Image (cartoon, rainbow, N blue to C red):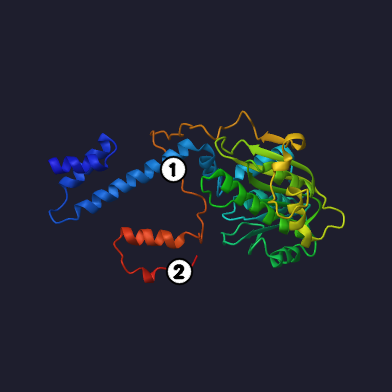
């Protein structure tokens, strides 16, 4: 009885669940693999509790699954559109760093599907949406996928070909590096990703177009703002309601693309560095230090989305069925080829006692 009690207490999380474990223990044969069965019960309970806990703690994660979005980030783009009306008059749009595809879903639902269902829209007038990422993603209706590098000029050429020689009305980018927790480092790497996105934007965005990109706020935010202002007459940093207050994440909403007169795409990085080193001294690092004091730049910052709506930092009670149970939904579309696939396989193999790892897939 003592062994049975310890086994139940080590895995169970309620009296009801413990009684089930005891019942199963009593009905096992002497030579059954008892520890493995108990372990499976424990994992099942932990998994169910973990999923329900996140659904309770993150209302937008739960709503994304209920409404068919691949990720909670879909609400961020929707709330930006509520404030800035970025989809008005858009016929050609590019989604950079698109996987797993939640922003591409928004573009499809807001642009492509309404036009497709409209009786007055001809096939030639349907909006064109191109999604670019190094990783493949599951198909989305009305979205053309390009697996490529956003810093490569050939990728820009592919986009232009899909647009029949025309340029985009809107470019969006929700890409971000794997964060380290060191805010200065994360901010720097993210700003470099934005400038990489700006590289392709200068090739594919038409004059007067819009560019939306994720940023990390920090001490050099003013430098990034001034760099973007070189190419857009209106730049606003926005914080959607669905973005957690505890996060340094925000979004640069850049409107009316107007490159400098005589601008050559090859001169992009020279112009960007000049913003951070206005004196022209080459031995100085590109920085925002000179933007303080009398040169201080005040950045327009706007909270967007229904401010009386759901709070992304608050826990909400789970909706219960008539019998008092809660049905936890699985994610709409897990990544089909994540870069961490081999790490997951190795972890699974280790837990199952597999020692021959050479047979595991080496693909991404």
Instruction: Identify which residue, 315 or 245, lies in the foreground.
Output: 245
Residue beneath the point at 63% across and 30% down: 307
Mark 1, secondary structure of its residue: loop
Residue beneath the point at 80% across and 64% down: 165
The disc label shown at residue 328, or none: 1
Residue named by callout 2 = 362
Instruction: Identify which residue, 296 or 167, lies in the foreground.
Output: 296
Q: Position of residue 130 (x, y in %)?
A: 68, 59
Residue beneath the point at 59% across and 53% down: 101
The disc label shown at residue 303, or none: none
Q: Position of residue 110 (x, y in %)?
A: 69, 47
Q: CA distance from mark 1 to mark 2?
A: 33 Å
Reply above or below: 150 against 277. Answer: below
Disc 1 crowd rating (10 Å Cα; few below 14, some 14-19, many 20+) is: some
Residue 330 in view, yes or no? yes
Q: Position of residue 49 (x, y in %)?
A: 38, 41
Query: Which comes before the other along the chain, label 1 or label 2?
Result: 1
Using the rendered view, name the quadrant where residue 265 is placed. bottom right
Mark 2, secondary structure of its residue: loop
Q: Position of residue 214 (x, y in %)?
A: 64, 46
Disc 2 crowd rating (10 Å Cα; few below 14, some 14-19, many 20+) is: few
The reply to whether discs 1 and 2 touch (Cβ–Cβ < 8 Å) is no
Reply above or below: 353 against 220. Answer: below
Instruction: Identify which residue, 110 or 322, lies in the foreground.
Output: 110
Q: How many marks?
A: 2
């Amino acid at each position: 009885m003592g062994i049975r009690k310890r086994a139940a207490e080590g895995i169970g999380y309620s009296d009801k669940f413990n009684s089930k474990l005891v019942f199963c223990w009593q009905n096992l044969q002497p030579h059954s693999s008892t520890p493995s069965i108990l372990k499976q019960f424990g994992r099942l309970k932990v998994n169910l509790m973990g999923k329900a806990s996140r659904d309770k703690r993150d209302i937008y994660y739960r709503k994304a699954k209920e409404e068919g979005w691949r990720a909670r980030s879909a609400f961020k783009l929707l709330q930006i559109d509520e404030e800035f009306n970025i989809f008005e008059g858009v016929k050609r749009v590019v989604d950079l760093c698109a996987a797993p595809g939640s922003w591409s879903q928004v573009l499809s639902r807001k642009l492509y599907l309404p036009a497709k269902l409209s009786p007055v829209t001809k096939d030639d007038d349907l909006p064109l949406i191109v999604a670019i990422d190094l990783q493949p993603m599951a198909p989305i209706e009305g979205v053309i996928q390009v697996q490529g590098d956003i810093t490569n000029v050939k990728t820009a050429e592919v986009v232009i070909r899909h647009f029949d020689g025309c340029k985009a009305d809107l470019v969006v980018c929700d890409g971000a590096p794997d964060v380290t927790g060191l805010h200065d480092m994360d901010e720097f790497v993210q700003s470099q990703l934005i400038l990489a996105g700006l590289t392709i934007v200068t090739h594919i965005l038409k004059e007067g177009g819009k560019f939306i990109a994720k940023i990390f706020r920090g001490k050099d935010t003013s430098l990034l703002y001034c760099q973007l202002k070189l190419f857009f007459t209106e730049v606003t940093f926005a914080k959607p309601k669905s973005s957690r207050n505890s996060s340094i994440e925000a979004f640069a909403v850049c409107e009316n693309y107007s490159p400098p007169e005589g601008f050559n795409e090859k001169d992009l990085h020279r112009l960007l560095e000049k913003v951070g080193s206005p004196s022209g001294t080459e031995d100085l690092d590109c920085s925002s230090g000179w933007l303080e004091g009398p040169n201080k730049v005040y950045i327009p910052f706007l909270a967007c989305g229904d401010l009386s709506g759901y709070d992304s930092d608050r826990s909400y009670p789970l909706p219960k069925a008539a019998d008092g149970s809660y049905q936890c939904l699985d994610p709409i579309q897990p990544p089909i080829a994540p870069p961490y696939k081999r790490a997951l396989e190795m972890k699974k193999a280790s837990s199952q006692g597999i020692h021959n790892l050479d047979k595991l897939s080496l693909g991404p």
